[in-house]
Amino acid sequence: MSWSTMLINFDAREQWPQCPTIKEIRDQGSCGSCWAFGAVEAISDRICILSNGLQNVEVSAEDLLTCCGFQCGEGCNGGFPSGAWNFWKKQGLVSGGLYDSHIGCRPYSIPPCEHHVNGSRPPCSGEGGDTPKCSKICEPGYSPSYKEDKHFGCDAYSVPSDEKEIMAEIYKNGPVEAAFSVYTDFLLYKSGVYQHVSGEMVGGHAVRILGWGVENGTPYWLVGNSWNTDWGDNGFFKILRGRDHCGIESEIVAGVPCTEHYSERI
C-alpha cells in the first residue's frame, strides 16, 4: 500500500471487529506492571488477528509479570517491553483474564484501583511493592494444564522509530507495545490529543498503540492504557504523532505468534 493512499485514520478495533481483546482495557492495579500489560494486550490482539478471529485468548499478564524474572526487569517495580516479548518467544505465555474473572489459566491477582481519578474503587497505592510469585499451575478447574496452555511467539522484534514504519506494522500485523515518559499533566488526561505542556516527569510507562488519526489538524496515535476504563477517554488516549513526543515512537516492540500452534487447536 502506497503512503499516498495510506489511511488518514486507522483503528484496529474497527479493522478487526472479530477480535474483542482489541477493545478491552485492563487494570494493572497498584503494581508497576505496565511493561507486561502492553505486551500481553498486543499479543492477545495479534493471536486473534493472525487466526482470523478463530483463536481468541486473553494472554496472562500474571504469567509474564511473575515468571519472566530478571530478563524482564523488576516485576511490579518496572520492566522492559523487549524482555517481555522475548519471554513470550522463548517460554510462552498462558491465558489469564482480569482480576477475579476466573478466566483462563492464570488470571491477574492484583485488584483494580483508581488511577488518578475518583471512583468506587480504592485509590492506587503507587506502583511498586512485592511481585506475586510465579506459579506454574493453572487455577482450579481450568484445563488444559499450565504447560499445554502456553502460547508462543515465533518472532519478537523492535520496530524502527519512524512514524511510517510504525503505521505499516500496525496496519499489517496489529497493535504494538510502546513506552514513553509520563509527566504530571498526562495523569489528568480526559480527551483530545495529549501534548506535554507542564509538570515534572514521574516515570516511564508502557502502553499499546492500536491506531492513528488526525484531530483538528493534529496527527495522533490512538493508545490503550492499563488504568481501567474510568481513566482518560474510556481507558484510551490520543498522543501527538510523528514527533517522537515524550519518546512514544522510540521504543516500539512487536512480534508474530506461532501459527502452527493455532491450527492444532482450531
Image: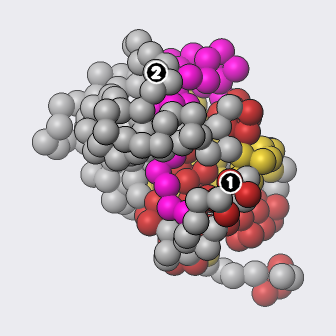
**Closer mark to the observer between disc 1 and disc 2:** 1
User: Residue 97 appears at what percent x and percent y?
Assistant: 38, 45
Query: In the rendered structure, which amino acid carries the disc numbered 2?
Result: Ser
Q: Which residue occupies the foreground of this view, 25 or 62?
A: 62
Report the residue marked by disc 1.
Answer: 261
Magenta range: 55-82
Front one among 189 and 208: 208
Q: Residue at x 56, y 22 (%)?
A: 67
Q: Is residue 97 above or below residue 51?
A: above
Q: How is the image coloured?
A: secondary structure
Q: Which residue occupies 71% across, 70% down?
A: 171
The extreme top residue here reads: 130
Q: Is residue 159 left or right of residue 131?
A: right
Residue neighbourhood size for the residue with mark 1, other residues' Cα within 10 Å, grouped as few (<14), some (14–19), many (≥20): some
Residue placed under numbered mark 2 in the picture: 135
Q: Is residue 71 magenta?
A: yes
127 vs 199: above or below:
above
Circle nearer the N terminus (1, 2): 2
- Secondary structure of the residue carrying tag 1 is helix
Amino acid type of the residue that numbered disc 1 sits on in the rendered structure: His
Who's the residue at 70% across and 20% down the image? 71
Rendered-image quadrant of the C terminus:
bottom right
| Res 85 quadrant in image | top right
Labelled disc at residue 159: none
In this rendering, the answer to whether 92 lies above or below 13 is above
x 49%, y 75%: residue: 18
Q: Image quarter for residue 28?
A: top left
Left or right of 259? Residue 27 is: left
Measured from the top left, where is residue 72 in percent x and y? 65, 24
**Residues at marks 1 and 2, CA–CA distance in whole angstroms:** 23 Å
